[in-house]
Amino acid sequence: MKVVEIVDRYDTDCVPESSRGNKVAYIQGQGDKMCNRTITVTKTMKHPVYVYYQLENFYQNHRRYVKSRNDAQLRSPKERDVKTCAPEDNVGGEPIVPCGLVAWSLFNDTYQFSRNSQELPVNKKDISWKSDRDSKFGKNVFPKNFQTGAPIGGGTLDPKKPLSEQEDLIVWMRTAALPIFRKLYGKIETDLHAGETITVALENNYNTYSFNGEKKLVLSTTSWLGGRNDFLGVAYLTVGSICLFLAVTFSVLYLVKPRQLGDPSYLSWNRSPGG
């Protein structure tokens, strides 16, 4: 089964023309951030259709960013040592839960889908790894003092739900290795047919303008190999091409200037001191 994918970049179009001269001021302001997008389905997409958000020029692998977290705190409510989470470690002497820059920068754009004026529900259950929910995020650890101090980084959390049920956070906390990455937002549990028009009402909250980043909405199906991933194909072709080039180069060298196999005269102790 072939993977079908739709990618829509919206970070620029979802800023009013009057504010495009200062996008940072717009995204940090208190005005309406709602934006309507229209997506045309080019090929039939069998369910489940995976909804991703894609960020570009966002270095989640930066050393100081990756270290600004406390995994023990995510598992246990007794953990109060948050020194590794600086500068997002405490508010008024009380620890932030979850602490650190990774949690603080939680993605908070939202998407609502409709087709023919009928809502397309997005299933946000089980979008994270089961091992993360069961082992890395505690069932008795609740958000506390999160996003209460200035500046506000990203999304907020429901203080009544344990971290093990806050799946958007769990997905976000699994940091990406590359500056261009996708994270799962949810799943549409119905087929999308070729030629249909999908209306997306999104809330453009997340600030990527400060670092010239990009935001894209991605709808994708999967195959038995997973989703589309051009990186592996490019990597295999590159390595294969290098190996082919080296093989041809050494073959030409051998043909032009052959060396007798097993010739003991090439051994260092069989050569004269003068070379």
Image: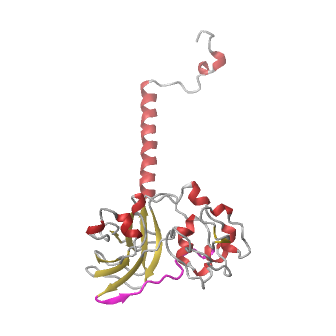
Q: Among all residues in the image, which is located at the extreme top?
A: 274
Q: Residue at x 45, y 52 (%)?
A: 235
Q: Residue at x 31, y 69 (%)?
A: 15
Residue nearest the viewer, comparing 131 with 71: 71
Residue nearest the viewer, comparing 267 with 17: 17
- Left or right: residue 223 versus residue 149 is left
Check the picture and name the quadrant holding the N terminus.
bottom left
Q: In which quadrant of the rendered view does residue 90 lie?
A: bottom right
* Main secondary structure of the magenta stretch: loop
Check the picture and name the quadrant holding the C terminus.
top right
Residue 124 visible to an observer of this rendering: yes
Q: Could you say where residue 61 lies in the image, as x and y percent from the top left?
A: 54, 57
Identify the magenta region: 116-131
Q: Among all residues in the image, which is located at the extreme bottom?
A: 118
- Left or right: residue 149 versus residue 53 is right
Residue nearest the viewer, comparing 111 with 124: 111
Residue 119 magenta-highlighted: yes
Q: In which quadrant of the rendered view does residue 14 lie?
A: bottom left
Residue nearest the viewer, comparing 200 with 88: 88
Residue 40 visible to an observer of this rendering: no
Q: In this rendering, is residue 79 above or below 245? A: below
Residue 260 magenta-highlighted: no
Q: Residue at x 45, y 24 (%)?
A: 257
Q: Could you say where residue 13 lies in the image, as x and y percent from the top left?
A: 29, 69
